């Protein structure tokens, strides 16, 4: 028994006892009665120069480089390769001839169905067709085309089709370039003349428009500058008002804090006074006790000792009440002073708040005044800009009038053409008659040589005009003449008649 391990790019092909067909593995035990072969999966480059012929019987050479190897990601394909080609090295003549035969056969079959023009123009599609058909044939051997590089088509010696075709294309491109150059020169000369004329025509217009634009831009710049300054001033006033408000708030808070501190001091002083009174009472009491003990020690009489003791106790009680009354009076006095000081501080804080509000209102009034002045200045600049625009347009008209030699009619016609006045007139007239279907009657009242002479001739002429005139009015408006004048007859004749009543 042997344990065999294949390299990273290899496979073991095992046959023999216990295996129906073949077994592929990267590592395995080789049992008695079994044999194994190692084959490499590394792809190999094949370089060919395939000779083919188009449908017009024109030969050509197709240089190609194919990178081909076993399909390692498909186990059925590896089985096919192991069975059919693993005994041969990929670089061997047997495999190379097999691949070359497939490539040449498919290339010739495909080229025979195409004209040389189709092959030359559709080189990319032709290469892809060759690649797909060759891969289809290699699938039955378990091989895969990893890369295919088909070079440019080459003429067969003695048949210079591609050479002549390239020369033809070069000549056509050269002729087209000459025609384009001539056309470009023509257009350049015409365009140069047109540009010179347009330059002369538009010089005055451009100068006037430039002056107008410069004046407008200057006015807009000044307007923007004033606007920015006004906004900065308003912002500064707002910031000053905020600072004043913050200072007032701080002063108010300081007053509250001072009040609380002084109240705390008063309370501390009161507590100290109360404690002092209590300690003084204890001292007096101890003093009295010491005196009593001394009297007892001096063997004074019991009555005297008792008298002195009661007297001292009464004195101590009286002293204690006096001290308590004084402490209470002192405390009330301190509380009254603290309340008075707090009211004073509160009044000062309200005064500071009122002053800050007054300052803020004053600053707001000044800011509104500055804004009003800025708006007034902006209106003034706008008026100056309109005046400058009018002056520029006047200068433009004067220059235009001088350019046409003082001819007012030519200047008027140019301005009407420039502003599209004629187009507007034509459009207005067209809109006026749109949808109308006027009936136009043409009539003749006869020869002027016949009829009465003198004044009666003129009267007769007027009377002859009435029938066709009334007939035309009736056809266009539907109105009939009054009954006292007569009625129109419905005669189909060309001349209308008026039947007198």
Image: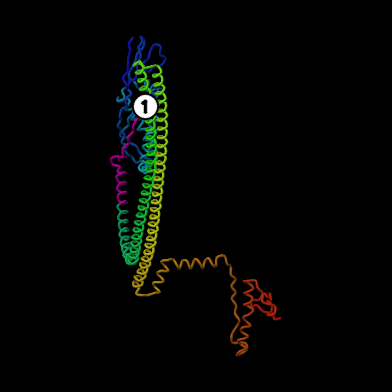
Q: Which residues are magenta?
A: 146-173
- Residue at the spot 65% in from the left edge and 71% down from the top edge: 478
Viewport quadrant of the N terminus = top left
In depth, the one of 306 and 290 nearer the eye is: 306
**Which color scheme is applied?**
rainbow
Residue found at the far bottom of this picture: 454
Membership of 203 in magenta stretch: no
Whether residue 9 sits left or right of residue 412 in the image: it is: left
Q: Quadrant of residue 32?
A: top left
Quarter of the image for residue 156 reads top left
Say if 299 sits above or below 448 in the image: above
Asked whether residue 125 is in view, the answer is no
- Asked whether 166 falls inside the magenta stretch, the response is yes
List x then y, in percent, for residue 297: 34, 16
Q: Quadrant of residue 111?
A: top left
Residue position for label 1: 280
User: Farthest left residue?
Assistant: 157
Q: Nearer the viewer, residue 453 or 170?
A: 453
């Amino acid at each position: 028994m042997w344990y065999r391990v294949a390299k990273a790019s290899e496979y073991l092909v095992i046959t023999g006892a216990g295996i129906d067909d073949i077994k592929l593995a990267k590592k395995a035990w080789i049992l008695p009665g079994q044999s194994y072969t190692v084959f490499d999966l590394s792809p190999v480059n094949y370089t060919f120069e395939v000779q083919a012929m188009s449908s017009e019987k024109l030969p050509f050479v197709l240089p190609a480089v194919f990178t081909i190897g076993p399909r390692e990601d498909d186990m059925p394909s590896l089985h096919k390769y192991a069975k059919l080609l693993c005994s041969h090295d990929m670089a061997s003549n047997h495999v190379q001839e097999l691949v070359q035969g497939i490539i040449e056969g498919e290339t010739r079959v495909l080229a025979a169905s195409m004209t040389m023009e189709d092959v030359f123009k559709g080189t990319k599609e032709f290469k892809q067709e060759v690649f797909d058909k060759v891969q289809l044939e290699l699938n039955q051997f378990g091989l895969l085309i990893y890369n295919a590089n088909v070079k440019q088509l080459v003429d067969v010696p003695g048949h210079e089709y591609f050479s002549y075709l390239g020369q033809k294309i070069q000549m056509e491109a050269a002729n087209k370039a000459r025609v384009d150059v001539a056309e470009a020169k023509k257009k350049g000369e015409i365009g140069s003349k047109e540009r010179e004329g347009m330059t002369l025509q538009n010089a005055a217009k451009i100068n006037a428009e430039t002056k107008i634009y410069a004046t407008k831009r200057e006015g807009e710049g000044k307007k923007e500058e004033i606007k920015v300054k006004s906004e900065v001033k308003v912002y500064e006033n707002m910031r000053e008002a905020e600072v004043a408000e913050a200072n007032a708030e701080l002063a108010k808070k300081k007053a509250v804090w001072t009040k609380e501190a002084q109240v705390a001091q008063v309370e501390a002083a009161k507590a100290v006074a109360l404690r002092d009174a209590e300690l003084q009472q204890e001292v007096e009491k101890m003093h009295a006790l010491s005196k009593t003990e001394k009297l007892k020690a001096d063997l004074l009489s019991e009555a005297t000792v008792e008298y002195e003791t009661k007297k001292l106790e009464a004195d101590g009680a009286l002293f204690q009440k006096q001290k308590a009354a004084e402490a209470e009076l002192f405390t009330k006095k301190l509380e009254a002073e603290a309340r008075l000081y707090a009211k004073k501080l509160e009044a000062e804080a309200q005064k500071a708040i009122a002053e800050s509000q007054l300052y803020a209102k004053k600053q707001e009034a000044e800011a509104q005044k500055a804004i009003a002045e800025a708006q007034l200045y902006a209106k003034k600049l706008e008026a100056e800009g309109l005046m400058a625009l009018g002056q520029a347009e006047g200068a433009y008209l004067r220059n235009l009038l001088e350019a046409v030699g003082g001819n007012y009619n030519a200047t008027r016609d140019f301005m009407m053409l420039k502003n599209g006045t004629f187009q507007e007139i034509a459009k207005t007239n067209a809109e006026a008659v749109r949808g109308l279907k006027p009936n136009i009657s043409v009539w003749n009242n006869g020869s002027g040589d016949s009829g009465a002479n003198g004044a009666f001739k003129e009267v007769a002429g007027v009377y002859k005009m009435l029938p066709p005139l009334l007939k035309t009015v009736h056809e266009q408006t539907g109105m009939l003449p009054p009954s006292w004048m007569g009625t129109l007859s419905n005669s189909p004749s060309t001349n209308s008649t008026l039947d007198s009543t």
